[in-house]
Image: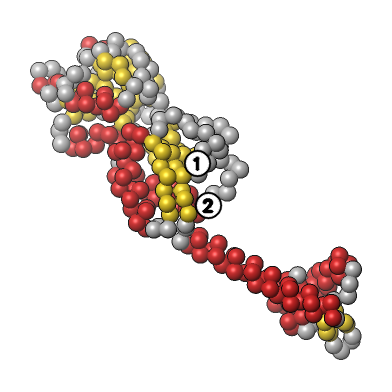
């Protein structure tokens, strides 16, 4: 249809080919195939002139209208790409979202006022297809299988205790000393009675420390409160304790060792779902925002 309209508009195969940036033979083949499919002659060709047949006139008017609609549809999509619109459905872990996402999400919504956000905070992995979720933010050591995953941020963890707790105790100098302290365990992010660490010597050697947790909890926010109140030492995510460390409320212990396993924040979406501009821009905003707030 594009080739046919171009020939009719320019009255020439060669001019239509130049306009479409294809060869003359390509345009000719397109027109011949179109006439065979319609079983009607659209163009009267002579050595000196080219004109539309009666059927060609009718078809030309309809083609022009259709191609105009196509062009308008393309422009509308492009405008939406520049200024994304519609509902964006996101799920994210509750603790991480409460600490890190308010400024990022509010900034994103101000920048793109035509987007409506449906945010589900849950630490459970929600079925993206069943709930029509566009993108899920998840903290994991590796991304789930059978989905597309974009790594957005490396989640650091630290061994910490409160200034109050160490007011009458010296800080541990080696990993072997940790079991002698009151250990508070997050049984979701780490094993209940075993902590693993990697040294900063570049050898990537794993060190195992067996503990007898005085408090065993499945929520890092609650665990942080216990650590702040001097109940013992714990492994906590850096995004949750940055301000506490800066204000001296918490002390970082054995900084030469990093808790394992390493964890990352992933943006996850279904492989059979087109990555719309609103999803891509949201992931960009989260990735860039975390560099500033974590």
**The quadrant where residue 75 appears:** bottom right
| Dots 2, 1 in contact, CB < 8 A | no
The quadrant of the rendering that contains the N terminus is bottom right
Residue 18, placed above or below residue 163: below
Please, what secondary structure does the residue beneath circle 2 have? loop
**The quadrant where residue 173 appears:** top left
User: What residue is disc 1 on?
Assistant: 133
Residue 81, placed above or below residue 20: above
Residue 233 pos. (x, y %): 23, 20
User: What residue is disc 2 on?
Assistant: 276
Residue 193, placed above or below residue 110: above
Q: Residue 272: which disc? A: none
The Cα–Cα distance between marks 2 and 1, rounded to whole angstroms, is 13 Å
Name the residue rendered at 42%, 58% in the picture. 114
Residue 151 pos. (x, y %): 46, 40
Please, what secondary structure does the residue beneath circle 1 have? loop
Q: In the shown orientation, is residue 170 left or right of residue 257?
A: left
């Amino acid at each position: 249809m594009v080739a046919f309209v171009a020939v009719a508009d320019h009255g020439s195969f060669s001019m239509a080919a130049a306009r479409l940036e294809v060869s003359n033979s390509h345009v000719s083949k397109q027109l011949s195939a179109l006439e065979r499919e319609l079983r009607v002659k659209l163009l009267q060709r002579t050595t000196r002139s080219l004109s539309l047949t009666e059927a060609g006139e009718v078809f030309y008017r309809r083609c022009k209208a259709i191609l105009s609609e196509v062009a308008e549809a393309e422009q509308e999509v492009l405008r939406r790409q520049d200024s994304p619109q519609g509902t964006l459905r996101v799920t994210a872990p509750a603790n991480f979202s409460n600490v890190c996402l308010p400024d990022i999400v509010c900034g994103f919504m101000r920048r793109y006022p035509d987007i409506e956000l449906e945010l589900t905070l849950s630490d459970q992995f929600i079925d993206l297809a069943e709930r029509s979720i566009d993108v899920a933010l998840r903290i994991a050591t590796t991304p789930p299988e059978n989905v597309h995953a974009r790594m957005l941020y490396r989640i650091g963890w630290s061994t910490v205790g409160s200034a109050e707790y160490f007011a009458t105790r010296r800080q541990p100098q080696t990993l072997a000393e940790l079991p002698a302290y009151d250990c508070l365990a997050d049984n979701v992010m780490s094993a209940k009675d075993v902590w693993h660490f990697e040294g900063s010597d570049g050898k990537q050697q794993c060190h195992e420390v067996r503990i007898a947790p005085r408090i065993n909890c499945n929520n890092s926010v609650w665990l942080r409160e216990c650590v702040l109140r001097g109940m013992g030492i714990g492994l906590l995510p850096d995004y949750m304790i940055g301000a506490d460390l800066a204000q001296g409320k918490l002390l970082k212990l054995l900084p030469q060792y990093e808790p394992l396993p390493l964890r990352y924040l992933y943006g996850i979406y279904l492989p059979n779902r087109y990555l719309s501009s609103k999803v891509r821009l949201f992931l960009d905003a989260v990735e860039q925002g975390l560099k500033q707030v974590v």
